[in-house]
Image (cartoon, rainbow, N blue to C red):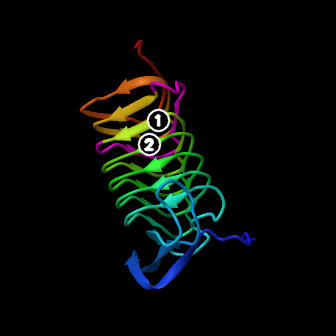
């Protein structure tokens, strides 16, 4: 059920096509957060089912949400970030640059996904996690950053697949690593 006080509308005359699907630019109908006021243009969605009318979630720039993907809560997409498939972006999570969340992945908490990162499969991210620079997360991987001030940072050409579990705080910055299963607890002292 759509709320009576919608926060955006779809612009029928401002569209793009992604993977054969027509996406519509959004336009704010009311103030949503800081720089998003009535009349401000946002990113692109395939339908209103992709971006909740509740909360402060928003797509900026040319970010896209389509297929059965869902953006809720205070989640944000910037620049050319994409969410598709049956993926969900919730709570205060954010995607930047050319990041992609797809499949049935769930990205939540205060997670940050930047650059050429892909999160897919049935992966789950929560807490304070930051993925940078060509990281690929898939399978049933589970990532949780448990420290609000330092978080869990994974960067470099790293693939996290299968049933890998990574939690804790600190940095994992291998130049090239493939983690396919196992449990890793990362904790670095400040």
Q: Which residue is mark 1?
A: 129
Report whether 177 appears left or right of 182. left
Give the spatial CA distance, label 1 vs label 2: 6 Å
Q: State the residue at coordinates (49%, 46%).
A: 139
Q: Is residue 136 magenta?
A: yes
> Which image quarter holds the C terminus?
top left
Residue at (53, 78) in percent of width and height: 10
The residue range painted magenta reads 133-150
Q: Main secondary structure of the magenta part?
A: loop
Mark 1 and mark 2 residues within 8 Å of each other at the beta carbon: yes
User: Which residue does the image show at 61% across and 68% down from the upper left?
Assistant: 7
Relative to 93, does residue 30 appear above or below in the rendering? below
- Is residue 39 left or right of 72 when viewed as pictured? left
Query: Seen in the image, is 38 located left or right of residue 2?
Result: left
Q: Badge 2 local density, few (<14 within 10 Å), some, or many (20+)?
A: many
Q: Quadrant of the N terminus?
A: bottom right
Which residue is denoted by mark 2 in the rendering? 112
Does the magenta run of residues contain 70? no
Q: Position of residue 117 (x, y in %)?
A: 35, 48
* Residue drawn at the location 50% of the way across and 53% of the way down: 34
> Quadrant of the rendered structure where residue 186 is?
top left
Q: Secondary structure at mark 1?
A: strand
């Amino acid at each position: 059920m759509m709320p009576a006080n919608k926060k955006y509308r779809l612009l029928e005359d401002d569209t793009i096509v992604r993977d054969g699907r027509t996406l519509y630019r959004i336009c704010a109908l009311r103030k949503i957060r800081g720089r998003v006021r009535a009349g401000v243009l946002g990113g692109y969605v395939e339908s209103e089912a992709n971006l909740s009318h509740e909360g402060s979630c928003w797509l900026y720039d040319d970010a896209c949400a389509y297929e059965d993907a869902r953006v809720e809560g205070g989640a944000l997409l910037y620049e050319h970030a994409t969410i598709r498939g049956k993926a969900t972006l919730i709570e205060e999570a954010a995607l930047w640059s050319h990041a992609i969340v797809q499949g049935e992945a769930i990205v939540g908490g205060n997670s940050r996904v930047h650059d050429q990162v892909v999160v897919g499969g049935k992966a789950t991210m929560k807490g304070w996690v930051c993925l940078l620079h060509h990281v690929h997360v898939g399978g049933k991987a589970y990532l949780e950053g448990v420290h609000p001030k330092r978080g869990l940072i994974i960067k470099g050409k790293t693939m996290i697949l299968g049933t890998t579990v990574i939690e804790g705080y600190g940095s994992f910055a291998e130049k090239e690593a493939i983690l396919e299963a196992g449990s890793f607890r990362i904790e670095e002292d400040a």
